[in-house]
Amino acid sequence: MAEQDIICVLIAYFFGGICSGYYLVRFKANLDIRDYGSGGVGARNVGRVLGKSGFIVTLLLDSLKGITAILLARWLDLTEPAVSFVLIAVTAGHIWPLFLHFRGGRGVSTAIGAYLVYDYSLALLLLAITLILTIFQRDFIINGLAAFMLLPLAAYALELPGYQIITSAGVSVIILYAHRRHICKKFAELLKKKES
């Protein structure tokens, strides 16, 4: 990658680290959102403290962060593989923000916002897979995570460019890792149900 590409990727990471939910709760309630609920700074956890309005504002701002990062990368005329790294970086920045000691959110809203302008077909694939899985299983969070996991395979099956397949795989890995406790908890619940 060129020097400009590397700088843009680093900027995307730091931009991703501006976790709106954390600052919103700090401003409105003078609390550290990471000490409540799931411990994340995402919309669902903010909603537990600030209610529906906090949820919506955080969701929109986190999504807008991903959208802005990709639009800026395209405006600066980065190569498409470099834009892919920007997508990964802004998502990783939200999950592991430097200024919050690497304790951020789970990255879903930021990633979806980025996908919408990176390649809307990937965002539509995520939605379609999630809705199909909902027919068989009602847990929307698990279905969404499974959709992220299946997205690289769907991108490969649709013969999308190699860098998009690699990008979707990279984003999926970090989002699944960020949700590892929730995934483990659900697996434990399933095992208990089978045993009983």
Image (cartoon, rainbow, N blue to C red):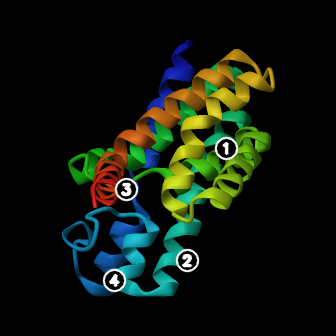
The residue tagged 3 is 105
Mark 2 and mark 3: Cα distance apart in space = 15 Å
Vertical comparison of 36 with 85: above or below: below
Residue 77 visible in the current orientation: no
Q: Identify which residue is drawn at 31% across, 58% down.
A: 189
**Separation of marks 4 and 1 at Cα, in angstroms:** 28 Å
Q: Which of marks 4 and 3 is nearer the N terminus?
A: 4
Please, what secondary structure does the residue beneath circle 2 have?
helix
Q: Which residue is drawn at 64% across and 60% down?
A: 134
Q: Which of marks 2 and 1 is nearer the N terminus?
A: 2
> How dense is the environment of label 2, judged by Cα within 10 Å: few (below 14), some, or many (20 and up)?
some
Type of amino acid under label 2? Ile
Against 41, residue 98 (above or below) is above
Please indicate whether residue 169 sits to the left or right of residue 187 in the image: right
Q: Quadrant of residue 59?
A: bottom right
> In the displayed structure, does residue 127 sit left or right of residue 95?
right
The first of marks 2 and 3 along the sequence is 2
SS under mark 1: helix
Residue with the most extreme front position:
196
Question: Residue at left 72%, top 40%?
Answer: 122
**Residue 56: mark in rendering:** 2
- The amino acid at mark 3 is Gly
Q: Where is residue 87 in the image (x, y as percent from the top left)?
A: 57, 36
Q: Contact (CB < 8 A) between labels 4 and 3?
A: no
Residue under numbered circle 4: 49
Q: What residue type is labelled 4?
A: Val
**Which residue is labeled 1 in the image?**
115
Determine crowd level at label 4: few under 14, some 14-19, many 20+ residues with C-alpha closer than 10 A: some
Query: Hey, which quadrant is residue 163 in on the image?
Result: top right
Mark 2–mark 1 Cα distance, whole angstroms, equals 19 Å
Visible residue check, residue 174? yes
